[in-house]
Image (cartoon, helix red, strand yellow):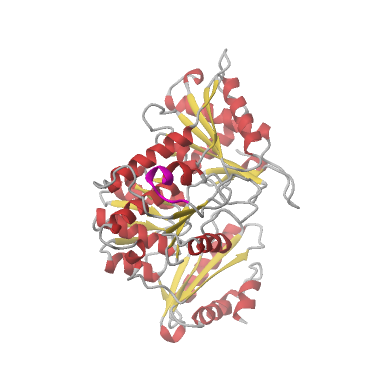
Amino acid sequence: MLSESWKRLQNGSDIRGVALEGVEGESVNLTPDIAGKIACAFGTWLSNKRGKRVQDLRISVGNDSRLSGPMLREAVIKGLTDMGCRVSCFNLASTPAMFMSTVIPGYEYDGAIMLTASHLPFNRNGLKFFTRDGGLEKQDITELLEIAQEGKFAASSQSGTVEEVDFISVYAADLVDKIRRGVNDSDDYMEPLKGFRIVVDAGNGAGGFFAEKVLKPLGADISGSQYLEPDGRFPNHIPNPENKEAMEAVRKAVLDNNADLGIIFDTDVDRAGAVDKNGKEINRNRIIALMSAIVLEEHPASVIVTDSITSDELKIFIEKTLGGIHHRFKRGYKNVINEAIRLNNEGQESHLAIETSGHAALKENYFLDDGAYLIAKILIKMAKLRKENKTIDMLLADLAEPLESKEFRMNILEKDFKAYGNRIINELNEYASTTYGWNVEPKNYEGIRVSFNKENGDGWFLLRLSLHDPLMPLNIESRIEGGVKIIAAKLLDFLKRYNELDISTLEKYAG
């Protein structure tokens, strides 16, 4: 049984913690010592899973641009080599590159460790783990932490070795090759992006390599790209395609430089967003719509698995316009990916699992959520469309969008927050089912989703319990002006009865 301190390090299928001082009220709990023990636990776990002695294991280790990355990386490498493992240090890397190191011919490591905390603040860090079967699952992480807590690690009589490998260049070259083959331009096979100006905004994360190592060899003009240098203070904006400031930064870069496309990555490049030549953002529902258009042309009638907060208009676009099947599932990139894998295993073709956050995983690419591969697919389509005198934004011409959209995050003050949150959802379900004008979505996998007609706000809400935190996110969309406020007021009347739910933001908005 995990102690409370070890349990707090688990974040679903990842490990995350506070690695640096500097934020009031957040004490360090992911120290080099702890990171080293977790690495030893991974080596032990991997030795058992692979049926290999620890001294025969080859493990790759990389990190994003976080300030604590090098410190924790060295502790991880020391833990692994003290056990006898053979380690390759990749230094700055992306999360998808770490997985690819287990499958790219000539490398094929037994396991990989990435040090990252995605878009979280500078003081956080974490660990992600991969084998050639993909990322570890939630139960695997619990097992790792139990091994780390007990400190019973596999041992070797000899120390392991360390070598440095510039793997991000290997990974980038693989992307370049895939784009060349995907476009297959008979006029200019080597530089299919010649004539395009494409700006990259890496937000000072690990994604700066994409401009120099992927776009440039393909012939693209990358002038106007910004914040490519890794800097774990993230001085310009948060590297996050869901962040308004970040999207505005890349949008401005596109318009200022008259670019054909803008690209933005999160810190460790497992998520991405884009901006078209007109300055229109391609993120959230729009990135799902664009990838659905690309995938469904290649795989007609495929199931597109998304998270739960996608719009009704997106569903209509996927099913009525594109002829696919839209399957809304739970939030959480692993949930969405695992659901697509489950459908395929049951004989129902699903080629895309994608979240509004920008996590996108394709069947053709190991169901790996890879922001750089997502962009590669867009670039391939963009180059092909040019042959038809078309642009990428034309694929979204028939996508309708809600007029208003709002998210509220309401803290749960009750200690047993999961039980309290589930009680609210269950009682709301009963209330909505018997209230005129409230239409409960029957096929819903997370929380409760209710839609309303034109007289009652012309939209929907989804109330759910956060995967890990004591809060309830509430998403509301409407097709009419003032519709979100109408729906919010209806829900507020119900939620007022729960004293341990902080509804102050909702009350302030609904007036």
Q: Furthest residue to the bottom?
A: 455
Using the image as rendered, state which of residue 161 and residue 226 is in the foreground: 226
| Position in image of residue 257 (x %, y %) | 49, 60
Q: Is residue 107 magenta?
A: no
Residue span colored magenta: 215-222
Q: Nearer the viewer, residue 323 or 255?
A: 255
Residue 224 vs residue 483, the one in the foreground: 224
Q: Position of residue 59 (x, y in %)?
A: 50, 27
In magenta stretch: residue 217: yes
Q: Is residue 355 left or right of residue 503?
A: left
| Relative to 25, residue 451 above or below | below
Would you identify the image quadrant in which residue 491 lies? bottom right
Quarter of the image with the C terminus in it: bottom right
Q: Residue at x 25, y 53 (%)?
A: 298
Is residue 370 something one can see in this rendering? no
* Residue 286 appears anywhere in the view: yes
Q: Position of residue 414 (x, y in %)?
A: 66, 61
Instruction: Compare residues 74 and 204 and report the one nearer the observer.
Output: 204
